[in-house]
Image (spheres, rainbow, N blue to C red):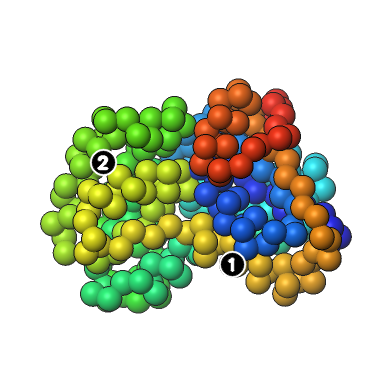
Amino acid sequence: MRTKSIGIFDSGIGGLSVFRQVVELLPNESVIYFGDTARVPYGNRDPETIIQYAMECADFLVSQDVKMLVVACNTICAYAFEALQNRFSLPIVGVIDSGLKTLLQTTKNEKVGILGTTATISSGIYPRKIGACNPQIQVHSVATPLFVPLVEEGFIEHKAVDLIVEEYLSALKKENIDSILLACTHYPFLRKVIEKCVGNKIVVKDASEACAIEVSHELVKRGLATTATEAHYLFFVSGEAKKFQKMGEKFLGRNIESIQEVTLP
């Protein structure tokens, strides 16, 4: 069981931000990554569709005999995390709780911003969970639905990105926040542009590092940490493999040697 792979999935390429942190923190752990690139983005889908897609992605990874599921998608966590826990007996780690811990530890003035997909922001899950932890914190949420398509199309350094980011964040910058959480795993691809837009007085955080730490803790707690000395990485996508490979290698700074296109039911 210990030598089995960790399964990470996302609506597209964004979950590679979590993959990168996991393999850096746990270099001996093998990982299978699945990106549902044929159906990205999830952020403009209705809740029932999001749950259906999440189940199909998880079913695929479970069929690959993984020992843990890592939900590297805020939208899925917002709508389908409980359903996934009810369906599978495997340990499941998600990015929302990890991101919350990071944000709560970062803010000093208790005024924070949340950037996410339309579905994630509409769910209200971040203000709800933050309020349960600390009702004094003011939460300013902003839906930024164009961010995911920009990342998926590789327009990370396009001149239009600066204008779009500024348009989304102009009002948020006036709220005297001291911290912003990137509540979508695609958004770290745009982190430099976002940090440039908000300035150095606002700390920009994402959940990927905290999620990797939680994965490590869960593996140790459940006796699933590997004793292997060599890790293997497999990538599966439901869309075009070459496009994913090009963007993925650029972001990870390493070759993606094994990538396969699969068709979900």
4 w.r.t. 152: above or below: below
Quarter of the image for residue 211 reads bottom right
On screen, residue 88 above or below 38 = below
Q: Where residue 183 sits: x, y (%)?
A: 41, 53
Q: Is residue 187 left or right of residue 193?
A: right
For the residue pair 260 and 174, the one nearer the viewer reads as 260
Q: Residue furthest left?
A: 174
The answer to whether any part of residue 190 appears in the image is yes
- As rendered, which of 214 and 157 lies closer to the eye? 157
Neighbor class of circle 1 (other Cα within 10 Å; few <14, some 14-19, many 20+) is some
The type of residue carrying mark 2 is Val
Query: Which quadrant does the C terminus fall into?
Result: top right
Return the residue nearer the eye: 74 or 21. 21
Residue located 26% across and 41% down the image: 165
Q: Secondary structure at mark 2?
A: helix
Q: Say few, some or many: other residues with alpha carbon within 10 Å of mark 2 (under 14 / 14 to 19 / 20 or more).
A: some
- Residues at circles 2 and 1 in contact by the CB criterion of under 8 Å: no
Residue 38 in view:
no
Q: Residue at the spot x=65%, y=48% of the render?
A: 8
First reached walking from the N terminus: tag 2 or tag 1: 2
Tell me the residue that label 2 is attached to.
Answer: 165
Q: Is residue 125 left or right of residue 226?
A: left
Q: Residue at x 20, y 42 (%)?
A: 166
Q: Position of residue 111 (x, y in %)?
A: 24, 68
Q: Secondary structure at mark 1?
A: helix
Q: Quadrant of residue 141?
A: bottom left
> At 66% from the left edge and 37% from the top edge, which residue is drawn?
256
Instruction: Give the x, y percent position of residue 102.
Output: 43, 68
Q: Give the Cα distance between marks 2 and 1.
A: 29 Å
Q: Nearer the viewer, residue 207 or 242?
A: 242
- Circle 1 is placed at which residue position? 213
